[in-house]
Image (spheres, rainbow, N blue to C red):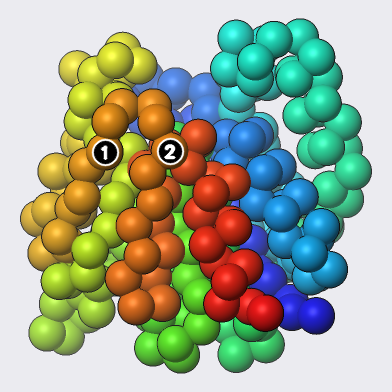
Amino acid sequence: MSNILFVVTGADHWTLADGTAHPTGFWAEEVVAPYEAFTGAGHEVVVATPGGVVPNVDRASLAPEVNGGPEGADRVVRALASFTQLQQPLKLEEVDPADYDAVFYPGGHGPMEDLAVSAASARVLTAALASGKALGVVCHAPAALLATGNAVGGSPFAGYRLTGFTNAEESQAGLADKAKWLLQDRLVELGADFREGEPWSPHVVVDRNLYTGQNPASAGPLAEEMLKALY
């Protein structure tokens, strides 16, 4: 049995280019699908957030239209309620990545607000990458990699093949024109080898011990890929 650290955004909004606060948090499917995959395989999950705040679910991610209908939406709500660790997160600033066998970052727009500039998260990411243990990051969560860009010699993620929420998907979601910056652009600037798949389709990229997924539909497949490293 492995212990897996979920690093979840503590933000409840994303500040847009005009200064307005767009309500957000973590995206439900990106937490639920990996949680069910990991715990279903017998592993334990621990949650950490910046400051130890209880994370906020993006209400849009609970809508029937993004969960395959009302039954799917109800199932996601029940799954979140059963994920009791979300209500008792550790403080990310106090987490020792060496205590865990894998690290996973779910997305939602929240990471664009807090994890993208979090030194505590950068420390966890850098240590996880260097350890050789499985490190999974999905959708908007690769924004957290941007906080590693100030390292001496540049980000340790420079040169890695990876993916994340694309400019095309942000445009189709109606937020690209309102954003201060776009994730795909910033990851390319970081030096990453960004691999773009079809919008909204599952797309997972694995490079060494870094596992990345493009969008919500990629969260479950990404977790399944990570499980191969945990057996």
If you read the primary sequence from the N terminus, does the residue marked by circle 2 or circle 1 appear first?
Answer: 1
Q: Indicate left or right for 125 with 16 as reference.
A: right
Task: Quadrant for residue 153, please give it.
Answer: bottom left
Percent x, y of residue 72: 75, 20
- At horizontal 59% and vertical 58% (from top left) the residue drawn is 224
Is 177 situated above or below 181?
above
Say few, some or many: other residues with alpha carbon within 10 Å of mark 2 (under 14 / 14 to 19 / 20 or more). Answer: some
| Picture layout, residue 29 above or below residue 148 | above
- Residue at image mark 1: 197
As rendered, which of 93 and 130 lies closer to the eye?
130
Q: Is residue 91 left or right of residue 115?
A: right
Q: Are marks 2 and 1 in contact (CB under 8 Å)?
A: yes
User: What residue does disc 2 label?
Assistant: 202
Looking at the rendering, in which quadrant would you find the N terminus? bottom right
Label at residue 170: none
Label 2: state its secondary structure.
loop
The answer to whether any part of residue 150 appears in the image is: no
